Every structure is written in structure tokens, then in C-alpha cells.
């Protein structure tokens, strides 16, 4: 199995289940935009080197690919994109804009900037990746980095970021649903997006908020899948082939930026359709007006 990927999160899994149920019509587009301070968090030099798996397209693009592929069924056909290096003081790929197509020609966009200017939390109810409410301040990562006296001090700061308390936070989740930026799945009869408590369905007839009470939070969903494979003999959704397919998108994005052309994808795999809980289907029926 690969760990942790954003398609373990309840709202992403709920979107996929709802789309597969047919209640909101066929999927027509997926759009994912995320603006963070990634480039100004404490880093080891290797984390900026794309040949060693560094940089935003490799480190964060795989999460965007994971979300988009899971929502759309897994089988992307191609990617076209541009990678940005915008700060010579923080060398490395720090941003990208990409256009992707599934084999059925359903389009998707993935946009990421790690340059600590506009924060996506202004679009996500002030909530961040782990479901925690984010402080209403500005440029904190840049300011904190300026206090580091050289690479050794930056590495010391990095060790603090990876402390056990932070890992526990990721395992247990926050008070809200996690937001990997803005994620909107557009279907024929409704748009779907993450809400603080679960999922919001913007249908033909109504906007309906669906709480995902009882769904696994944080890293617990990953552990649940692992246990089901080891103890119950289930087949892992997030296996090595799934991880390779996500990584292929990141590599193709970088190659597309360098060659200025669309890159075909050859290692994509389908994802099984999860069951749609009755309460989710009922909410969708109300939203679309059936």
C-alpha cells in the first residue's frame, strides 16, 4: 500500500461514491486549486531537487493526481502543464498549472502554488489539510524562515515540524474535514465540494450539506484499509500500481513543461466503485429534485 494519500479522506470517497451511484449524473469536470507556503517551510536541500523526488510537482502533484484520479475512476489519458520556479532564493519547482483528461475525455485542472502569497484557506472556510482551523495571519512561513541562521538552523526547524505531536494530529484529524485546497467535482446535475462537516451538493433544485459523521478521519482510513487487507484478505485500492499511476502524472507534468506538449499516460489503473450510503443518495435526490 501507499500511504498517506488524500483519496483516503471521507469527502473524496463520498464524491466518488455519489458519482458512481448515478444520483447526480455523469462526471463532467474536476477542478483542484491549492495555494500554500510549501516553499518556505523548513526544508532539506534534497526536497527542492526534482531528480531526487523534490519540488512541488513531485511532492504535492501526486496528491492532486490522487484526488482527481479517485474521483474520476482512475484512468487518466494525458496531462499538459507548466511548472514554475519563481524565487531564486528557494531554488526548485514551486508551482504548476496543469490540464488533464480522462480516457472518456472528462477534463480536470490541477493548480498549485507554494509561494506563500494567496492562501487557499480563504476559499476553504479557514480550514487546512488536517481539518484544523488555520490562524488568520499572513506570511508566517516566510517570516519564520528569515529567523533561521543558515542551513543547519533550518534543518533544526524542520525536525520540530516533524515532531511526534504533529504526526498525532495527522493521525487523529481536526475538528473539521480536511481540505487539500479547493476541490470541486462537476456532474451533469450537481457540483460537489468539501464542506467543514462533510460534503455540499449544489443540485438543480437545492444546495444540501451532508455530514459524513462516522466516516474514518485523518490517517485512520489508511489503517482501516491496511487491516482489511492483512486480516480480511481484501484487495488494497491504494496498492503499488495506484501509487505508480499517481507518480506518473507528476513526472508527465514536469516533462510536459519542459517539452511544451501534451504527455500521454501509460500506467493508469482503475479504482473500484465504492458503495453509496443511503443517506448520501437521499441527499443527492433532494438536491437534484428527483
Image: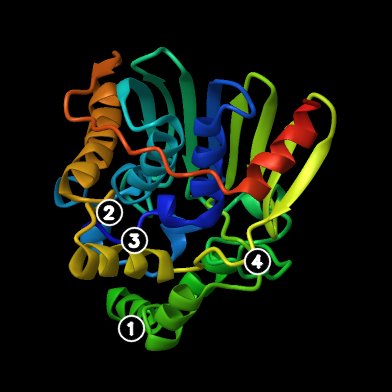
**Inter-mark Cα distance, 1 to 3:** 24 Å
Q: Secondary structure at mark 3?
A: loop
Q: Earlier in the sequence, mark 2 or mark 1?
A: 2
**Inter-mark Cα distance, 4 to 2:** 31 Å
Q: Nearer the viewer, residue 199 or 144?
A: 199
Foreground disc of the pair 2, 3: 3
Q: Earlier in the sequence, mark 4 or mark 1?
A: 1
Residue at 24 percent of width and 43 percent of height: 242
Q: Earlier in the sequence, mark 1 or mark 3?
A: 3
Structure colour scheme: rainbow
**Inter-mark Cα distance, 2 to 1:** 17 Å
- The local crowd at label 4, few if under 14, some if 14 to 19, many if 20 or more residues have their Cα within 10 Å, is some
Residue under numbered circle 1: 156
Q: Earlier in the sequence, mark 3 or mark 4?
A: 3
Residue at 42 percent of width and 50 percent of height: 7
Residue under numbered circle 3: 4
User: What numbered label is drawn on residue 48?
Assistant: 2
Q: Nearer the viewer, residue 194 or 121?
A: 194
Residue 119 in view (yes/no): no
Find out whether the residues at labels 2 and 3 contact each other: C-beta distance under 8 Å.
Answer: no
Residue 248 falls in image quadrant = top left
Amino acid at each position: 500500500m501507499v500511504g498517506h494519500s488524500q483519496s483516503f479522506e471521507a469527502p473524496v470517497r463520498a464524491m466518488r461514491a455519489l458519482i458512481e451511484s448515478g444520483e447526480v449524473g455523469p462526471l463532467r469536470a474536476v477542478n483542484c486549486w491549492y495555494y500554500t507556503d510549501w516553499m518556505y517551510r523548513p526544508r532539506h536541500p534534497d526536497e527542492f531537487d526534482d531528480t531526487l523526488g523534490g519540488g512541488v510537482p513531485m511532492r504535492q502533484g501526486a496528491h492532486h493526481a490522487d484526488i482527481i484520479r479517485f474521483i474520476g475512476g482512475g484512468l487518466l489519458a494525458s496531462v499538459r502543464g507548466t511548472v514554475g520556479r519563481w524565487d531564486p532564493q528557494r531554488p526548485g519547482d514551486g508551482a504548476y498549472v496543469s490540464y488533464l483528461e480522462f480516457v472518456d475525455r472528462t477534463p480536470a485542472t490541477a493548480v498549485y502554488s507554494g509561494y506563500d502569497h494567496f492562501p487557499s484557506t480563504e476559499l476553504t472556510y479557514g480550514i487546512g489539510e488536517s481539518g484544523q482551523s488555520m490562524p488568520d495571519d499572513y506570511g508566517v512561513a516566510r517570516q519564520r524562515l528569515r529567523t533561521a541562521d543558515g542551513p543547519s538552523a533550518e534543518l533544526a526547524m524542520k525536525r520540530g515540524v516533524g515532531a511526534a505531536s504533529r504526526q498525532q494530529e495527522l493521525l487523529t484529524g481536526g475538528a473539521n474535514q480536511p481540505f487539500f485546497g479547493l476541490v470541486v467535482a462537476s456532474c451533469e446535475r450537481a457540483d460537489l465540494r468539501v464542506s467543514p462537516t462533510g460534503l455540499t451538493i449544489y443540485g438543480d433544485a437545492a444546495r444540501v450539506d451532508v455530514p459524513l459523521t462516522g466516516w474514518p478521519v485523518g490517517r485512520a482510513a489508511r489503517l482501516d484499509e491496511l487491516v482489511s487487507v492483512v486480516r480480511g484478505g481484501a484487495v488494497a485500492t491504494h496498492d503499488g500500481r495506484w501509487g505508480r499511476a499517481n507518480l506518473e502524472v507528476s513526472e508527465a507534468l514536469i516533462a510536459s513543461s519542459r517539452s511544451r506538449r501534451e504527455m500521454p499516460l501509460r500506467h493508469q489503473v482503475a479504482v473500484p466503485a465504492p458503495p453509496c450510503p443511503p443517506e448520501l443518495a437521499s441527499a443527492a435526490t433532494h438536491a437534484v429534485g428527483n
